[in-house]
Amino acid sequence: MPFPFALPTTSSSSFTDCITSSTHPSLLFSATTSRGVLRDALKRYKRIPPSSQPSNLPTVLAAVNEYLPYLFALDAGLCGTKVAGEELDIVLVKELEVEWRPTLAASIPGREPARVKLQSLESEIFFVLATLAYVHSLQARAQLHTLYNATLPTSEQRQTAIASAMKSFLEANAVHGYLIGRAGSWSAQPASAAIDISVPVLNALAELTIAEATLITVLKDDPYPGIVLEDRNKQSKDWMFKAVEIPKVRAHLFARLCLSAAGHAAKAQAMLGRASKVDESLVKYLDDLRRTARGKACRFLGIDAELAGRTGEGIAWLRGAKKELGFAAMGAEEEKKASGFAKLKKEWAEKREDRKIEKGGDWGADAGKFEEGRVVDMLEKKWVKMNDTIGVQLIPPSEPLLAGIPSGREYHTPKLFIPPALDEDVIIRMRAPHDPSDVAFEGDEEDSGEEADKVTPVGAFPGTKGAYSCGTSYF
């Protein structure tokens, strides 16, 4: 259940005001126009309802992919690198000035972070690529949402959604990895206030995406979340005529993969600790992701023990999983003594999470911790009943088992991000000068600052909005 990233927005800007080219004058005009299209796409995405945003992601992705080749061409020209075999004479007249609104910076609840002024092409490249990585993560989130809808997907739909989500996570990881490598050549960070493109945050996001991709590998062959979802599906009638068939899983391998994901999440959490003023929701999400991954690992180790006939040890692993998830592990006696209010509270929490999934808003903000707790509860009830009636094995304490938990195992090899380049025929067309009467498109959408000017401050008396503007003394 990926983190619900918000996409940044940017101010209008023109490359023709700060860069000139004697060999490819149309390049600046085309780059400014592509930037204007991206700016409008980001503004529109932000303003549409959250339920409609996933379907708008391909539009944003197309705008980013259209803009990037021009942006890298300008960067290559300033560095003296050939593009499609041609040398670009690019001269910086004055420093590029743009504004981007970071989305991972801490802010007052209910208020967006302030926009950051940037004065370099490098910062522009970093923010556009960070936006690309966020779009890939959000596309993976949209794919995984189909697995938890009221209408259960078929096995083919499930495999397609998981494969698409895994590909998107690896694409996002490749972009973050490229940014980390590129940041290593900085003599000074372009904008210390731009949290989204700071080195600690970039490292944390790279670890986060590889952890998500590793958990997706496990989800592909994990039947238990689907069984729990089937039990909650009111439309399903399969229980009337057949029992649920649970295929055997490679439990020990899956446990080590989950432990690898937990390790990456822990690294990301530590890296964010070195960054200042990071959004608390991201910090909490990483902690929940680490707990979820370790809880999954304990569950799979319990499944491995139960398959080998050690049901008592399997139950101990499940109770250890509850501890890792941060849930209270209750024995049979404690379960009987639980008050009706506690059970009612748990049922209410489950229904609330189900409603979030149906609406598609902030579902899964706990990194799947609550859903994993449901799976552990189901298995524990089933195994305890079996052990009490058939096996009668002693249930050992879970602490020694958790102390001897095995090491993780890596699955994915990080991909390399290759910066897109303009085709040779496009570069040739850029030699022609553009019509002086034409004006580069910088975007039609209103700027965020203009929107704020139209809003009357909360509690202000009608007609006195001007007295509340910045820099005005009012007594």
Image: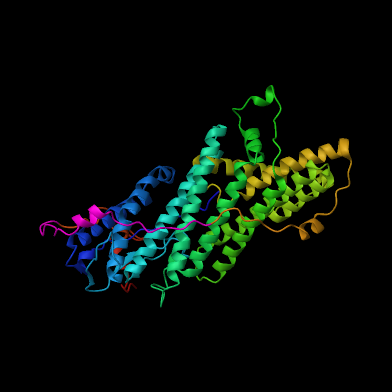
Q: Nearer the viewer, residue 407 or 136?
A: 407
Say how many tags the image has: 0
Residue lying at the far bottom of the rendered structure: 187
Q: Nearer the viewer, residue 359 or 429?
A: 429
Residue lying at the far top of the rendered structure: 241
**Dominant secondary structure (helix, strand or loop) of the stretch shown in magenta:** loop
Residue positioned 57% across, 57% down in the render: 285
Residue positioned 57% across, 33% down in the render: 155
Residue 381 lies in what quarter of the image? top right
Image check: 239 left or right of 120? right
Q: Nearer the viewer, residue 321 or 446?
A: 321
In the rendered image of this protein, does residue 360 appear above or below residue 110? above
Image check: 342 left or right of 236? right
Image check: 430 left or right of 67? left
Q: Quick check: is 433 in the magenta stretch?
A: yes
Whether residue 459 is visible here, answered yes or no, is no
Q: Nearer the viewer, residue 384 or 37?
A: 37
Residue positioned 73% across, 57% down in the render: 406
Q: Position of residue 185 (x, y in %)?
A: 42, 73
Residue 223 lies in what quarter of the image? top right
Residue range highlighted in magenta? 414-438
Q: Quick check: is 336 in the magenta stretch?
A: no
Image check: 14 left or right of 158? left
Q: Position of residue 411 (x, y in %)?
A: 60, 53
Q: Position of residue 384 (x, y in %)?
A: 81, 41
Residue lying at the far front of the rendered structure: 85
Whether residue 354 is visible here, answered yes or no, is yes
Colour scheme employed for the rendering of this structure: rainbow
Is the C terminus in the top left, top right, bottom left or bottom right quadrant? Answer: bottom left
Residue positioned 61% across, 27% down in the render: 236
Q: Position of residue 400 (x, y in %)?
A: 81, 58
